[in-house]
Image (tube, rainbow, N blue to C red):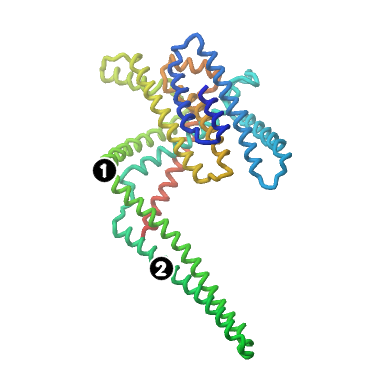
Amino acid sequence: MGFIEDTCIILITQRAGNFLLNFFCIKKLLQIILIKKHHSSRYFHWNVGLYLLLFMVIVLIPFYIAYFIISNIRNLRLNLIRPLTVLIYLVYLYFFWKLGDPFPLLSPKKGLLSIEQGVSRIGVIGVTVMALLSGFGAVNYPYSSMAYFMRPVSGADVAAVERRLLQTMDMIIAKKKRIVLAKKGGSRNLQTETRSKLWGILTPIALRGNQDNVKDMQNEVVALEELSRQLFLEAHDIQNARERLEWSQTWRGKYFNFLGYFFSVYCLWKIVISTINIIFDRVGKKDPVTRGMEIAVHWMGFNIDVTFWSQHISFYLVGCIVVTSIRGLLLTLTKFFYAISSSKSSNIIVLALAQIMGMYFVSSVLLMRMNMPAEYRIIITQVLGDLQFNFYHRWFDVIFLVSALSSLGFIYLAHKQAPKEGS
C-alpha cells in the first residue's frame, strides 16, 4: 500500500513526496515480477491493491485537484467552493468515462466498477504520456549528448558576447544618469525662473521640450534593457555550449557520446519497427530477450538454457527500464513544474505529479508485460483482466512515431538556426 501512504502524505503535507512515490512505483512493479512467490494470495492482494490505486487516481486525487483549483479563484464566495468542486469533478468523471468510447479497450460484458473499466481508461492516458516522452527522449538524448551536434564555441566568442553585454549595460547606466540630471535640471529651472513674468510665459514651452527629451531617453532605455536581456540569454547559452564542449572531452563525456551513438541507432530502429507494426498491424508475441537468445542458439550454436536465462535477464531488463523511465519522467515533470510553480499552485502541482505517477505506473504494467517471459505474462494478464493489450502496444507505436518525428523536426530546425544566432 505504498502508493496510498505516499499519496496521503502528499495530501496532508503538500510537500515533496516524489521520491517515496517513485520508490513505491519501482517496488510495486518488482512485486509483479516476483508475484509467483505468493501464489495463494497474489490475486487477492492484487485486486485490493489495484482497486485502492484506481480509487486514488480516479476519485480522490482529481477531487482534491478540483478543490484547490476552485479555492485559488479570487473573489469567490466560500459557500460556492464545494458545489463548484463537485460540479467540476462530475464533468471530469464524464469525460474520463467517455474516453473509452473511441477505443477498443475491453469486452462490453465487464461491470461498471470492474478493474478493467478503470485500468483501460487510465492506460490510454498513461500510454500516451509514456509514448510522448519516449519519442522525445529517443531523439533528444543523442542530440544533447553527442559531440557531433554540439555548437562549436571558442573563448573569443564568449568574450565578444560578454563585451557587448557590458557595453549595453554601460549605455543603460549613462542614459539613466542623463534622465535623472534632466529631471533635476528641469525642476530647478522651473523654480528659479518663474519669478520672471516673461519667463513664466515661455516656461511651458521649455518644460515641454525637456519632457519630450526625457521621454525619448526613457524609450531608448527600454529598448536597451530588452537588448541586454537578449544578450544575457545569448551569453548564457554560449557559455553553456562551451562548458558542454569541455565536458565532452572528459571520460564521462566520451562515455555519454558513445551512448548517444547507441541510442541514435536504437531510435532509428524503433522508428522503423513502429512504422512496420503500424502498417502491418503487428504485435510481438515474444519478449526481446527470449527472441534474441533463440536466435543466438539457432544461428550461432550456443548451448545455453533459454528458459532459465531469459527469465533472469528479462527481470533485470524490466527493472532497468522501470528505474530509468520513472526517473526520466520525474526529472521531466520536475523541470516543467518548477517553471510554472507558485505559492498558490504548489498544492495542485504536487497532486498532479501524484496523479501522473499513478497513471504512469498502470501504463508501465501494461507495456512491460511484453518484455517478460510467457509464464509471467499470463499472470499479469489474469491480474489485470480481459484487456485488449494489443491495442495499447499499437497505440504506443503510433504516438511514439508521431512524437519522435515531431521532435526530430523541431530539433533539426533549432539546430539549423543555432549558428545564425551565434553569428
At 48% across and 62% down in the image, what residue appears?
226
Q: Is residue 260 left or right of residue 353?
A: left
Evaluate whether residue 279 shows in this view. Answer: no
Give the labeled residue for mark 1: 250
Image quadrant in which you'd find residue 303: top left
Give the labeled residue for mark 2: 170
Q: Mark 2 touching mark 1, by CB under 8 A?
A: no
Mark 2 is surrounded, within 10 Å at the Cα level, by few (under 14), some (14 to 19) or many (20 or more) other residues, namely few
Q: Position of residue 275 (x, y in %)?
A: 44, 33
**What's under tag 2, amino acid-wise?**
Asp
- Height in image: 80 above or below 217? above
At 38% across and 40% down in the image, what residue appears?
141
Q: Is residue 77 left or right of residue 142?
A: right
Which is nearer the eye, 77 or 89?
77
Image quadrant in which you'd find residue 54: top right
At 55% across and 45% down in the image, what residue appears?
342
**What's under tag 1, amino acid-wise?**
Thr
- Height in image: 348 above or below 50? below
